Amino acid sequence: MNEPSQPSWQTEAVFRARVRGCLLGGALGDALGYPVEFSSLDSIRAAHGDRGVTGLVPDADGVIGRISDDTQMTLFTVEGLRQAHERERAKGIGGGALQLLGQAYGRWLYTQRKPRPDEGNRGLWGEAWLYARRAPGNACLSGLAGEAVPDPHAPLGPPGPVNPGSKGCGAVMRSAPFGLTGAPADRAFALAAHCAQITHGHPTGYYAAGALAATIAHVVHDGDSIEGAVLRTLRLLARYPGHEETTAALEHALDLAADGEPSAGKVEKLGQGWVAEEALAIGVYCALAAPSVSEALLLAVNHSGDSDSTGSVCGNLLGARHGDVGLPHAWLEHVEGRAVIGTLADDLAAECTRR
């Protein structure tokens, strides 16, 4: 019997570039949006000119390139996934992943309660720059404080047991890494959705998380365009009861992207991004509508809403599609923690291609 074919070094290099691109792109979008997260579009334009933010700008402390809780939690997602994949390499990622991801998010929660790492803390837990508190979401804080781990075999559709009414964007903004492991899109969707239930129980909150993961999986592993990946994700969503709100938001994003020149006005037709389906839809719209990566990222943060989360989702998508070489490096070199993010991305890619 013939042995299964091994991926070529070229295939692995492309995969590595896309994993790096997804994580670094998300961090860049986050850093672009963080200083203007709570500002109206009028206020952004008054402070930065008629075009709004045109690159990285200082935050309230005068620092350029800071990331928020969006990137913090995304990185802990990566750490948990890498550990789960390593432990269960022979079986693939299964139910045990939720326990390890819950522990990883518990480490993130620890960083939000302490001023600095304890001596001997390892991995992300030992990175002092991740102990900054950057307006973390209430559902993330309260959900993790309860230390609940969802049942990975429970059907999706009913509200989850933790924060059952919450569909804030705190789950979707951390969920791109589920699409980077090599798992098929339907498995990436399910794991991301179940993991989102650790903090967000509203079906739209966890379906949006699953939809981002599935879209990333289609882009990275199937080679789809972003539009093609979203269309395939919509077919996946249709299998689940209660998907309609997430589906409608994605369909609206696709329709607007096909409707002429991109604009902040069209972004705001999709909402402000504080809730999951809006953050996902804005990220998708901007990634599709703008003619370049840099213009898409700027479109994603120049609006009256959750600019860092919408910038992060847009950056995840664009980086997954174009790889780290396709990101604007003049901006990227100023992003907080970029070397650690790149190393974490390489570690995840290496683990997920290990046989």
Image: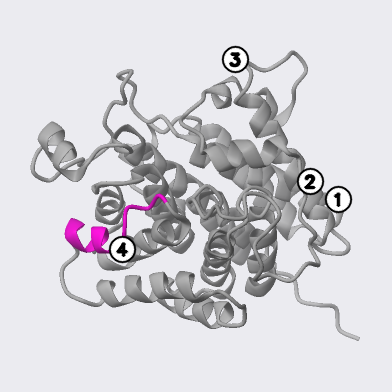
Q: Residue at x 21, y 40 (%)?
A: 53
Residue 270, label in figure: 4
Of the numbered discs 1 and 4, the one sitting upstream in the chain is 1
Q: Earlier in the sequence, mark 2 or mark 4?
A: 2
Q: What is the CA distance from the residue labelled 3 to the residue labelled 1?
A: 31 Å
Q: Is residue 71 magenta?
A: no
Q: Residues within 10 Å of mark 3 (few under 14, many from 20)?
A: some
Q: CA distance from mark 3 to mark 2?
A: 24 Å
Number of the label disc, if any, that sits on residue 115: 3
The mark nearer the N terminus, 3 or 2, is 2
In the rendered structure, which amino acid carries the disc numbered 3?
Pro
Q: Quadrant of the C terminus?
A: bottom right
Q: Secondary structure at mark 2?
A: helix
Separation of marks 3 and 4 at Cα, in angstroms? 37 Å
Marks 2 and 4, Cα distance to the nearest angstrom? 34 Å
Near-viewer residue (134 or 288): 134
**Residue type for callout 1:** Arg
Q: Give the position of the N terminus as an image quadrant.
A: bottom right
- Callout 2–callout 1 Cβ contact below 8 Å: yes
User: Which disc is residue 100 wearing?
Assistant: 2
Q: Which residues are magenta?
A: 263-274
Image coordinates for residue 42, horizontal then vertical, percent: 14, 42
Q: Secondary structure at mark 3?
A: loop
Would residue 42 be found to the left or right of residue 30 on screen? left
Q: Are marks 3 and 1 in contact (CB under 8 Å)?
A: no
Residue at 37%, 31% in the rendered image: 65
